[in-house]
Image (cartoon, rainbow, N blue to C red):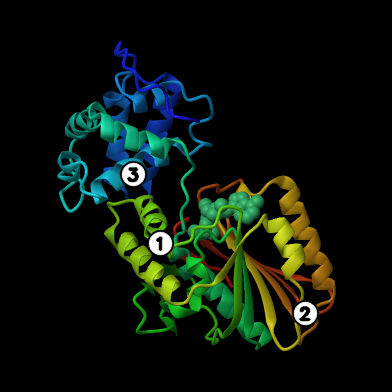
Amino acid sequence: MACASPSRRKTDLALPPAIAAAFARQADFCRLFGAPLTAAVCDAAIIAVDDGSTVGRTLIAWPGDAMADALMMRFTGGCNTLVRAGRAPALAALYPPATTPGVADLAAALRDVLADPGLDAALCGWLAGPPQTNEVARSGVLMPGMMAIAAITGLPLRLFELGCSAGLNLNLDRFGYDLGGVCAGDPAAAVQLRPAWTGPPPPLAAVRVIARRGADISPLAIADPAVAERLLAYVWPDQPERVARAEAAIAIGRAFPPVIDLADAGDWVEQHVAPVAASTSVVFHSIAFQYFPAATKARIAAHLAAMGAAATPDAPLAWLRYEMDDPALPQLPTLRLTLWRGGDPVETLLARAHPHGANLEWLV
Ligand SMILES: C[S@@+](CC[C@H](N)C(=O)[O-])C[C@H]1O[C@@H](n2cnc3c(N)ncnc32)[C@H](O)[C@@H]1O
């Protein structure tokens, strides 16, 4: 949705109940996942926003489903970028490293931002487009899956990531890991991942990647500083370790840029994925499948089943997915593997994990 008209006809109209409820829900979600400042920004928006600003009028007239549109992430990402750029010092003074402020203080700072026509216009620009993220800590869940595949097949891996965003996780073998006491990857890497681990350790198997390529319907070219900054603005600022990890992974991604194609995942899988001798072809994705159209999902499954029928022990095909696919536990994604090596595919539920990779329970 485009920004509302900048002309001001302030009548103190507040957010409608459905939009306010969505901000409150997002605040609960942020609190649950350890982002109290971002939660407070959402709560503060509920009391600070009225029809006196372009942002306010845009939010009040929002035509869609605020949750489905990730409207709150658009808003908090926009606030964060103003803070990161030093454009809103009074708001920035309430952000980390300051301790989490009260909602009233945040609301006052937000009102000041919205009263400034330049900041109001800049923030409104962030409402116009969907957020795009690329969570590096998800590699801490994907990597043990890769190790499980390598342990079974004993072959180097060719990686194909669907919905790869900026492709940060395509470099997962270039990060370092402590996975339930099992060390993997590069111990000297600037990105070190240690998800809180329960269950047995993963198999100790070397992951050797000989090819990597990704697809996204809206890929992020992090070589462009503005694109990288936009990606960083969506990382919750009250989780500085995530911000630092994203910055380090961006640096690795710039040093080792994987090929990323602008494509629908269904089209792309059909064009690129087939078993190849002396390697395991691994199609993987994290928190992406739910965003694919139904036809894309069906085409991916059909193509992998067809290619899997041609797989052999010397040319296996693996489908590794870290997705929110359990309706009984919608907040707790699973890590599932389908492996074709000739004959029927073998399905394994490998783990249940936090959506951002903070912890996981290894199940096999
Ligand atoms: C929530 S993000 C997850 C990104 C990344 N996998 C991660 O774990 O950080 C979902 C990604 O799926 C991409 N996407 C959505 N629909 C797609 C499609 N039909 N084909 C390819 N990518 C798609 C989005 O552009 C976005 O980058």
> Residue at label 3?
31
Q: Is label 3 in contact with label 2 (beta carbons under 8 Å)?
A: no
Residue positioned 80% across, 82% down in the render:
312
Q: Amino acid at mark 2?
A: Arg
Along the line of sight, which residue is nearer the eye, 354 or 106? 106
Q: Which residue is mark 1?
A: 358
Which residue is pictured at 23% across the width and 26% down the height?
115
**Number of numbered markers:** 3
Q: Earlier in the sequence, mark 2 or mark 1?
A: 2
Horizontal and vertical percent for residue 74? 41, 40
* Sequence-first disc among 1 and 3: 3
User: Is residue 201 shown to the viewer in this render?
Assistant: no
Quarter of the figure that contains the C terminus: bottom right
The disc, 3 or 2, on the residue closer to the chain's N-terminal end is 3
Answer with the quarter of the image where residue 105 lies: top left
Query: Which residue position holds label 2?
Result: 341
* Residue depicted at 54% across the width and 57% down the height: 219
